[in-house]
Amino acid sequence: MAAGQNKGYGSDVNIASTKIICLSFAVLAGISGVLLVSQERPAEAAGEMNCGCHPNKADKSFTHKPVKDGECSSCHKPSDQKHPKVKKGAFLLTDNGKVGLCNECHERKDIKKYVHGPVASGDCLDCHDVHQSDNKFQLKASGVALCYMCHDKTKLGRKFPHPPITEGKCLDCHDPHQSDNKYILKAEGSALCIMCHNKSMFSGKSIHGPVSTGECSACHVTHGTQYPHLLKHSFPEDFYTSFSKAQFDLCFKCHSASLADDQRTGAATNFRNGMFNLHFLHVNKADKGRSCKVCHDPHASSQPKLISSKVSGFGRWRIPIRYTKNDVGGTCVVGCHKPKSYNRIDPVVNP
């Protein structure tokens, strides 16, 4: 009995071993078949998330919708190459990776007069990540850091920068894709400025020439400058200043410097009492010459000749000015001196 049991136990072991060997051959044959199929059949479009072997492309804050939905085949199509044996070329972009691919889903961004360079050349991926990003719109960087990937940062570094530059808000003024305005600006001329600045600054009875024609850039630099208020050239900030033409370079780029040169003139300026030059009187002083802005508003005014109704004076007090113009001169009633009149033909004797 014991011998029979030993013999029976040995038979069971042999049977089990045979089964294991057969199963092993089956598994190996199956693996070989799988490998054979994977190596022989052409590439197939990915059906679901992550294309099986590839790293997860949908794990960041902002993900391209086809990636998020696992629809890789929206952009990638299989070729006749064998995958994974062939790494590159097994799948092709549905439109060769140029701007046409993006236009299959997105509206065209290259149909206006001025188009951003990467958009015009179809290089959308210069700015956007095709799969995912930590930045909105799948941008490769956030804010102004994206612009500095191509544009020279040093050209924008100024002592007095435009606030949108310092805040990284280039898109306050520029469209990132296209525009009908030069430099892909969102609006033209002063219309762009009044998107942020108070429109009332640019309207009145008298309007400075560049403002009326929408040429704010005649006086201001849009990105930044070495002068306050984004001015293109020097202009005195103080109420009183010693006169030099260099200090008033901004004004004299358009206006004749001769209007402040001579104490007596009959042609350099209409602001004169007879031949006595009243611009010279106010401005051309060694110690307490007055800045142009003491009387004139650089943008617009409710009075003729850009005469301000009130100007910043001493402390919190704003000096009132009431100016009346006539054909031969005018009258100023101001807070800084007694009322004065002037007449170019028949000089007025003021008290």
Image (cartoon, rainbow, N blue to C red):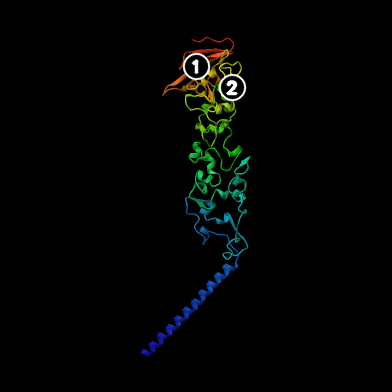
| Disc 2 residue crowd, few under 14, some 14–19, many 20+, Cα 10 Å | some
The answer to whether residue 189 is left or right of residue 289 is right
Circle on res. 72: none
Residue at image location 51% in from the left, 75% down from the top:
26
Q: Quadrant of the N terminus?
A: bottom left
Tag 2: residue type?
Answer: Ser
Question: Is residue 259 something one can see in this rendering?
Answer: yes
Element carrying mark 1? strand
Which badge, 2 or 1, comes first in the chain's sequence?
2
Element carrying mark 2? helix
The answer to whether residue 312 is left or right of residue 107 is left
Quarter location, residue 271 = top right
- State the count of labels: 2
Residue at image location 51% in from the left, 43% down from the top:
144
Question: Is residue 1 something one can see in this rendering?
Answer: no
Q: Position of residue 101 (x, y in %)?
A: 60, 51
Residue lying furthest front in this view? Answer: 286
Residue highlighted by disc 2: 258
Residue at image location 57% in from the left, 70% down from the top:
36
Up-down: is 34 above or below 112?
below
Q: Position of residue 239 (x, y in %)?
A: 47, 24
Q: Are marks 2 and 1 in contact (CB under 8 Å)?
A: no
Circle on res. 322: 1
Up-down: is 87 above or below 112?
below
Tag 1: residue type?
Answer: Arg
Instruction: Measure the C-alpha gap from mark 2 to mark 1.
Output: 26 Å
Up-down: is 23 above or below 217?
below
